[in-house]
Amino acid sequence: MRVTLFIRENCPDCERAKEWLDILQEEYPHDLYMVNVDQDYALKDKYIEEVPVLEVGPYKLKAPFTETEVRVTLGAAEQGGYHHGTNLSEPQHKQAILANRILFYFSKHWLAVFNFFVFIFVGLPFLAPVLMKSGAELPGRIIYKVYSPLCHQLAFRSWFLFGEQPAYPLERANTSFIPYEEIIGGTPEDLSAAHNFLGNELVGYKVALCERDIAIYGGILMAGLLFSLLRKRLKPLPLLLWAILGVAPMGLDGGSQLFAYIPFIDFPVRESTPLLRTITGLLFGIMNVWMAYPYVEEAMNETRALVYTKLARVRTSQNEY
């Protein structure tokens, strides 16, 4: 029978619980695994107010408990036929330990992993114009091609690098920029040309994601980095506020551009600006992180506490404690 005792340093109740288990060893033979919750903050957050905690299969005792309660719990587990589980071969055992160590590492560093991949995802679109400018057109075009299914890549809604200005919005957007129609010579109706236009030495080369997408993923990255400082204090954003602060501004800004295409209704033609696309995209990305990451953190803490307990049992059985 496997018994796990969660303890911490300088804990008289923990020592007392261990003494009771030693006394009951002959009556209820068991393997005792002690897990020091001070060695991992997820375990500490979970058990700090409860140690010592005794787990025997499905049974759990939280402090304060008595020797009689320990005896009853061990008896119930023995009577219920609780066993260690499936016996694994040596190679399977090693594979299980390796899998748990990988899972423990990921659950501990998931935020860094997320932020790294978001950084790569939002960084590569900026590498494409750099490659085009330097003459490495083939890898640059590959990046554009890879991102093409993920974004419309319309030139008049994209940022440009190495050109006369950072963006070339349509004339109807009423910005201070020289419009797309004048510099590039395209028309708003020719979406295929706007998608395929990558740039040139005069106007520069476009980023492989549009202005709003860059803002969304940039917001996710910025909020993810900020979350690393606030992860223990930040509560999840309520769904209603997420909809109001994150979804609604982007929906109104982007959706209102489609009103003019509704048949039989005379809506004025509207084109958003690079600034509005950036603000609404940033809001959407940041609010997504605020809503989702606290839940991910909670799930990862639960996972890490569980896996750490399994690995602690392994170390105990190998006399590493």
Image (spheres, helix red, strand yellow):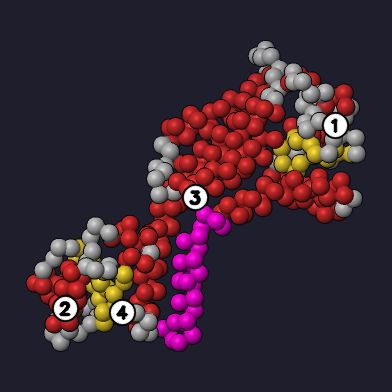
Find the distance from the CA under tag 2 to the CA under tag 1. Answer: 78 Å
Q: Is residue 94 above or below residue 149?
A: below
Which mark is in front, 4 or 1?
1
Type of amino acid at the residue the image marks with label 4? His
Question: Which residue position is annotated with label 1?
Answer: 164
Find the distance from the CA under tag 3 to the CA under tag 4. Answer: 38 Å
Q: Residues within 10 Å of mark 2 (few under 14, many from 20)?
A: few
Please tell me the numbered disc located at residue 230. Answer: none
State yes or no: residue 299 in magenta.
Answer: no
**Image mark count:** 4
Type of amino acid at the residue the image marks with label 3? Ser
148 displayed left or right of 46: right
Q: Residues within 10 Å of mark 4 (few under 14, many from 20)?
A: few
Question: Which residue position is annotated with label 3?
Answer: 228
Counting from the top left corner in percent of width and height, residue 1 is at: 24, 80
Which residue lies at the image location 43% right of the left edge and 32% below the top edge? 240
Range drawn in magenta: 85-113
Proximity of marks 3 and 4: CB atoms separated by less than 8 Å: no
Question: Which residue position is annotated with label 2?
Answer: 19
- Say which element carries label 1: loop
Q: Is residue 65 visible?
A: yes
State yes or no: residue 94 in magenta.
Answer: yes
Q: Is residue 77 above or below residue 165?
A: below
